[in-house]
Image (tube, rainbow, N blue to C red):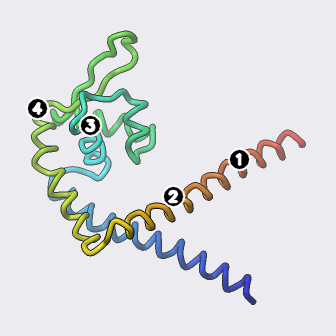
């Protein structure tokens, strides 16, 4: 019975994490839509803000957007005059994506108010609260990553044995 209750605790925790993310996404999506952007477009603009630009690999690693989706998002932002692609200096195939003047203006107008909106959800959190929450979330993330990596390794081993 004790192990069953332990499993319920972990499932309730995962459910609570998912519910927190769903509620955050609903609030953030509404705020981002008011800007005339989609969440992935905002993610790119927020990531590029205050940078001289990033190549696609760096941009992909710094956002929550999959590689296949990122190209389309950048193309739409480029079409809307918010970003530009510049061929890399040493390798013309490596484009640098950066904000245009219009993109920088959008970043400056919307980024800090968006962060303030998110900060409001954490009103009353102490530095210790943040440290404990972030530490626990990182531990959970790292354990799932390890399980994911092991599962991939186990699948490869199973396929080699057949």
Q: Which residue is mark 4?
A: 101
- What is the CA distance from the residue labelled 4 to the residue labelled 3? 12 Å
Residue ID at (60%, 80%): 9
10 Å crowding of disc 1: few (<14), some (14-19), many (20+):
few
Displayed quadrant of residue 69 = top left
Q: As drawn, which residue projects farthest toward the front? A: 128
Along the horizontal axis of the image, is 146 left or right of 136? right
**Location of residue 151 in the rendering, given as x and y in whole percent from the top left corner:** 72, 52
**Location of residue 118 in the rendering, given as x and y in whole percent from the top left corner:** 25, 64
Disc number placed over residue 48 in the picture, else none: 3
- What is the CA distance from the residue labelled 1 to the residue labelled 2? 21 Å
Label 2 secondary element? helix
10 Å crowding of disc 2: few (<14), some (14-19), many (20+):
few
Q: Which residue is mark 1?
A: 152
- Quadrant where the C terminus is found in the figure: top right
Label 3 secondary element? helix
Q: Earlier in the sequence, mark 1 or mark 2?
A: 2
Asked if the residues shown at circle 1 and circle 2 are in contact, with their CB atoms under 8 angstroms apart, the answer is no
Q: As drawn, which residue projects farthest toward the bottom? A: 1
Q: Earlier in the sequence, mark 3 or mark 2?
A: 3
Asked if the residues shown at circle 4 and circle 1 are in contact, with their CB atoms under 8 angstroms apart, the answer is no
Along the horizontal axis of the image, is 26 left or right of 1? left
Q: Nearer the viewer, residue 14 or 2?
A: 2
Disc number placed over residue 138 in the picture, else none: 2
- What is the CA distance from the residue labelled 3 to the residue labelled 2? 24 Å
């Amino acid at each position: 019975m004790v192990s069953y209750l332990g499993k319920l605790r972990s499932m309730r925790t995962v459910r609570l994490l998912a519910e927190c993310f769903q509620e955050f996404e609903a609030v953030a999506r509404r705020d981002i839509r008011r800007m005339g952007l989609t969440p992935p477009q905002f993610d790119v603009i927020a990531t590029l803000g205050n940078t001289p630009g990033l190549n696609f690999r760096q941009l992909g690693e710094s956002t929550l957007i999959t590689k296949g989706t990122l190209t389309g998002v950048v193309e739409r932002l480029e079409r809307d005059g918010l970003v530009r692609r510049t061929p890399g200096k040493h390798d013309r195939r490596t484009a640098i994506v950066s904000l245009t003047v219009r993109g920088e203006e959008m970043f400056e107008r919307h980024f800090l108010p968006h962060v303030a909106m998110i900060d409001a959800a954490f009103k009353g959190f102490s530095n210790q609260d943040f440290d404990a929450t972030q530490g626990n979330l990182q531990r959970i993330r790292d354990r799932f990553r390890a399980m994911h990596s092991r599962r991939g390794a186990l699948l490869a081993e199973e396929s080699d044995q057949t």
